[in-house]
Image: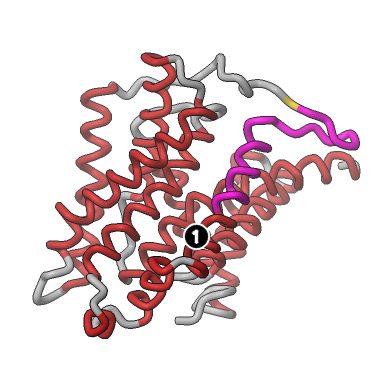
C-alpha cells in the first residue's frame, strides 16, 4: 500500500461522500421539519435516476443539463406525496409514529413495484453522456469527472440551501415551523404549506443527486435501497434533523468507506461505515451535530 494509493482512495471517498451527503440532506430536512423518517427516500432517488435516463433516451438531454429539470420535477413530486399521503398519515389519532412509518414504507414498496412493472428489472445505464468515462489528473491523483462534478454540485446545493434557510423569509418560516409547528399558526404561517415545500425541497435534493449518479451508476428498480441505507446511517451519524450534519456525515461516510476498502476486500467496505456508526451511537447517541 503506497502513499499514492491512499491519497487516490481518500480522494475518491471524499467525492462519493459529498454525494452521500446530498442524498442524506433531504432525509434530514424532512425529519428535522416534521419528525418523519421517509422510508421511500431511496425510491425517490430511483425515480430521479429513471427520469434522467428517459430524458436522455427520448429527448437526448444530457444528465448534466437534465439535473435542474429532474430536481424541479422531484420538488413537485415530493410536495404532491405530502399532500396525498403524508398529510393524512400525520392526522392519525393514535400510534402516529407507526402510521407514518408504514405510510412511507408502503409508499416505497408501491413505487418499487410500479418501477419493476413499467420499466422491468433490467439494468440500464447512460454510456454516452458528456462527462461519462472521463478522468482528470491532479498531482498524480486521478479523479472521475462525473463524481468531481457531482461533488461540485453537492457543494453548490448546500451553499444555496444555507442561504435559503438563513436569508429568506420562507427559510425563516421553515426554521420557525421546525421549532414549534403549533405556534407558527398564531403568526399566520400555514404549516401545511411549509411541510409541503419541505417535502418538495427534500425530494429536490435527492433528485439532484440522482441525476448526477445516473451518469456513472446502473439504473434499476432496487437501486435506491442501498443508497437509502447509507443515507439513514449518514443522517444518524451527523445528527437527526441536522441538514448540515448530514453534509458532514456524508463526507465521513465516504472517507470511512474508502479507508475500509483499502484494508478489507472491497465487498466488505460497508463494515467500516457501520462500525463507526455504532461507535457514535454508543458515545453520542444524538449524532455528531444533533441537538435532540
Compare residues 18 and 124 and report the one nearer the observer: 18
Residue 161 in picture, x, y percent from top left: 51, 58
Residue sitting at x 63%, y 31%: 146
Image quarter in which the C terminus is found: bottom left
Residue sitting at x 27%, y 37%: 112
Mark 1 = which residue?
233
Horizontally, is 120 left or right of 93 in the view? right
Compare residues 229 and 212 and report the one nearer the observer: 212
Q: Is residue 183 positioned above or below 243 on the image?
A: below
Residue sitting at x 83%, y 45%: 7
Q: Is residue 285 highlighted in magenta? A: no
Q: Is residue 151 highlighted in magenta? A: yes
Residue interval drawn in magenta: 136-157
Q: Secondary structure at mark 1?
A: helix
Horizontally, is 27 left or right of 101 in the view? right
Residue 280 in picture, x, y percent from top left: 58, 72
Amino acid at each position: 500500500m503506497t502513499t499514492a494509493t491512499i491519497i487516490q482512495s481518500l480522494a475518491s471517498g471524499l467525492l462519493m461522500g459529498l454525494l452521500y451527503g446530498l442524498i442524506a440532506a433531504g432525509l434530514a430536512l424532512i425529519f428535522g421539519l416534521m419528525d418523519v423518517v421517509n422510508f421511500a427516500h431511496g425510491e425517490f432517488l430511483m425515480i430521479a435516476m429513471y427520469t434522467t435516463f428517459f430524458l436522455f433516451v427520448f429527448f437526448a438531454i444530457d444528465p448534466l443539463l437534465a439535473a435542474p429539470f429532474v430536481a424541479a420535477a422531484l420538488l413537485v413530486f415530493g410536495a404532491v406525496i405530502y399532500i396525498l399521503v403524508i398529510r393524512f398519515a400525520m392526522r392519525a389519532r393514535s400510534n402516529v409514529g407507526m402510521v407514518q412509518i408504514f405510510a412511507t414504507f408502503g409508499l416505497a414498496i408501491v413505487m418499487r413495484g410500479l418501477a419493476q412493472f413499467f420499466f422491468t428489472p433490467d439494468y440500464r445505464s447512460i454510456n454516452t453522456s458528456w462527462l461519462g468515462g472521463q478522468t482528470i489528473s491532479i498531482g498524480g491523483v486521478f479523479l472521475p469527472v462525473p463524481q468531481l462534478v457531482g461533488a461540485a454540485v453537492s457543494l453548490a446545493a448546500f451553499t444555496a440551501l444555507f442561504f435559503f434557510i438563513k436569508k429568506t423569509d420562507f427559510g425563516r418560516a421553515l426554521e420557525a415551523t421546525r421549532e414549534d409547528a403549533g405556534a407558527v399558526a398564531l403568526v399566520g404561517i400555514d404549516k401545511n404549506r411549509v411541510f409541503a415545500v419541505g417535502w418538495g425541497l427534500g425530494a429536490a435534493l435527492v433528485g439532484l443527486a440522482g441525476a448526477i449518479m445516473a451518469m456513472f451508476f446502473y439504473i434499476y428498480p432496487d437501486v435506491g435501497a442501498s443508497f437509502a441505507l447509507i443515507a439513514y446511517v449518514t443522517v444518524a451519524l451527523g445528527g437527526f434533523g441536522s441538514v448540515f450534519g448530514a453534509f458532514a456525515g456524508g463526507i465521513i461516510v465516504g472517507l470511512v468507506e474508502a479507508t475500509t476498502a483499502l484494508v478489507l476486500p472491497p465487498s466488505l467496505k460497508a463494515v467500516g461505515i457501520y462500525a463507526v456508526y455504532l461507535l457514535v451511537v454508543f458515545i453520542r447517541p444524538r449524532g455528531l451535530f444533533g441537538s435532540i
